Image (cartoon, rainbow, N blue to C red):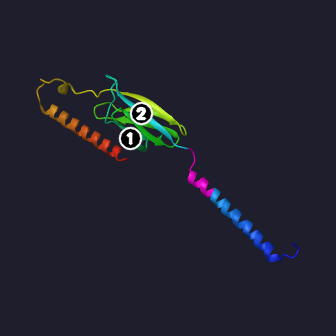
Amino acid sequence: MAGKSFSTVQSMVALVAGLSSIVGAAYSAVGTFHGGPAPGEIVAIVRDASTARPVTGAVVEVLATDSSLVTTAVQGDDGLARRSVPPGAYRVRIVHPDFVDAVRDVQVASATTAEMRVALEHRPRPAAARSEHAPRGRASVVDDAADAVGRGVGAGRRLLGRIGF
C-alpha cells in the first residue's frame, strides 16, 4: 500500500463522498414523498329522525374550523357518507332540501375513523302547503316556487358532491 499515489487516495475519498451524498439525497426524498401523518376518515350515518330510515341524497360538507369548505361527500343508498381527510378538527354540515340542516363538530386522528350518527328533522311545511283543500292564492304559488328553488339548489349540491367539488 505504500506504493499508492496521492491521486488514488483522492479518488477513494471522492467516491465515499459521492456515495454518501446519493444516500443522503435518497433518504431526504423518501421523507418528502412520505408526506407526514396518515389521513383519517369521516363517516356520517344520516337517518330520518322520525322513521330512522337512511336519508339519501343529502350532501355532507366537511368544513375547516374557519368555515371554509374542505370537501364534500354524497352518501349512498345505505345513508353512509365517507371521506378521507388529514388529521385535525372539522365541522360537518349535512344539507338536504327536505330536512333541516345539521351541523356537528368532529376531531379526526391519524389513521382512524371518526363516526357520527345524524338524525335529520323534516323541514316544516307552510300551513297552506299542509292542507290539500286550502285555496291556492298568490302566497301558495310563491311557496311552491320557493320549494322548487330549494329542490334545485339541493340537486345542484348533490351533483357537485358526486363530482368531487
Identify the residue under disc 2: 44
Disc with the residue nearer the chain's start (2 vs 1): 2
Answer with left or right where residue 23 lies relative to residue 9.
left
Indicate whether 144 appears above or below 52. below
Q: Residues within 10 Å of mark 1 (few under 14, many from 20)?
A: many
What's the magenta bit mostly, secondary-structure-wise?
Answer: helix
Left or right of 89? Residue 152 is: left
SS at circle 1: strand
Residue 34's place in the image compared with 131, above or below, is below
Q: Are marks 2 and 1 in contact (CB under 8 Å)?
A: yes
Q: Amino acid at mark 2?
A: Ala
Q: Quadrant of residue 25?
A: bottom right
Q: Position of residue 57 (x, y in %)?
A: 31, 36
Q: Residue 73 — which label?
A: 1
Marks 2/1: CA–CA distance: 9 Å
Q: Position of residue 152 (x, y in %)?
A: 25, 41
The three-letter amino acid code for the residue at tag 1 is: Ala
Where residue 93 sits, quadrant-wise, is: top left
Rendered residue at 29%/39% (across/down): 154
Query: Which disc number belongs to residue 149?
Result: none
Where is residue 116 drawn, in percent x and y?
A: 44, 30
State left or right for residue 111 relative to residue 14: left
Q: Which residues are magenta?
A: 28-37
Examine the rendered structure and indicate whether residue 111 appears above or below residue 126. Answer: below
Query: Who's the residue at 38% across and 40% down the image?
Result: 73
Within the magenta stretch, is there residue 156? no
For mark 2, give the secondary structure: strand
Q: Report x, y in % for residue 158.
A: 31, 41
